[in-house]
Image (spheres, rainbow, N blue to C red):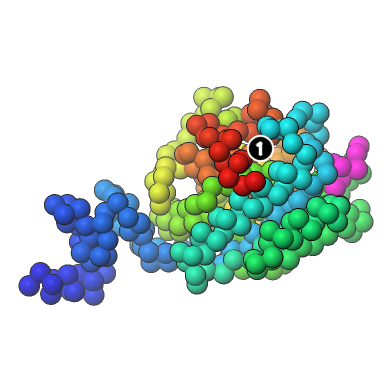
Amino acid sequence: MKKFFIKICKFLGFEIIDQNKFISPTLNKELNEDLSIINKKSIVLPLGEVKITRKVNSILIIIRVNTEIEVWDQNKRRLFEQPKIEYSIRSIKSLINSINFCQNKYSSLKIKIIILDDSSKDENLNRIKKIIKDANSEIISLDTKKFESKIKKQKTKETFSNLASLLQCFEIGKEIGEDLIFFVEDDYLHFETMLEEMITTYERVSSQVGKDIFMCPADYPYLYMNNEKTNILIGDKRHWRTINKTLCTFLTSKKLLDLYWENFLKNCEDRHDPFEKYINEIYKNEFCISPLKSLSIHLTNVNSSYGLSPFINYKKLWDQNE
């Protein structure tokens, strides 16, 4: 009778919890294992099940790379005070590790990488190519001349290039993006589970709120410097909070990129204060969330309010991606 009942529950799509044995007979798993099923259901004890109505089929990852400029628009040094190429290499390596971890769990998920490079030396590009050689990837070189009619003249060449590379990333996402698009800068280190948790949490939260959302993988220190109100949400494996600001590393959908294209375009037409002024305006109307604790860390100066996420072993993560 027990086996028959379990089969009926499976057929009807219900899950059984045996708290005595700490297992789920219908899932054939212990309760401390991952109980969620991508594109089908998200299960978090003791909150039960969320039916996935917003399924994720593919993700386009667009990485902005500049291996020459140490810290744009600043004279400060980054944590560990290494040449910029070391941050780019470790950032991409940690991202590839996260992609591989995600792909091993969800082999049917389509993941493509595009690296937009801004004037890297051949020796630096060759190091990057070695890291991504087994990934579904390509490298595109930034051509700033094509943006001279779209972006206002700036005080420095570096500022113009920064705006141009950001705009080209958005244009690539708009042109070839299909489902989710992850815009990534090359000075973030990512935990191995980052991408998997971003995707499964995206499915869970967007299914609950009934619309697409924005996500930032970093828990920035500035979020704790003001008495800002926030909502705490349950993701697939950790808590997340609503936020109203990000930098230029964030994940969203092709649908929202198209819907707010004027904001993305306007943000790149000139140097604003803050730099992400018109991107942040979108969050007045749309959900944007970031993880608690952080899934990625922004390797800037140790005193930057947009830098190191709290309660992270920075040195360990840095050394792991050497």
Q: Residue at x 82, y 41 (%)?
A: 69
Is most of the magenta stretch helix, strand or loop? Answer: helix
Q: Nearer the viewer, residue 257 or 38?
A: 38
Residue occupied by mark 1 = 299
Label 1 crowd bin: few (<14), some (14–19), many (20+), radius 10 Å: many
Query: On the rendered structure, is 115 left or right of 13?
Result: right
Q: Can see residue 56?
A: no
Residue 227 vs 293, above or below: the answer is above
Stretch of the chain drawn in magenta: 154-161
Residue 178 vs 231, above or below: the answer is below
Q: Can see residue 23?
A: yes
Image coordinates for residue 7, horizontal then vertical, percent:
18, 74
Q: Which of the 4 image quadrants contains residue 156?
A: top right
Q: Residue at x 72, y 60 (%)?
A: 130
Residue 156 located within the stretch drawn in magenta: yes
Residue 272 located within the stretch drawn in magenta: no
Image coordinates for residue 272, horizontal then vertical, percent:
77, 38
**Tag 1 secondary structure:** loop
Query: On the rendered structure, is 320 left or right of 166?
Result: left
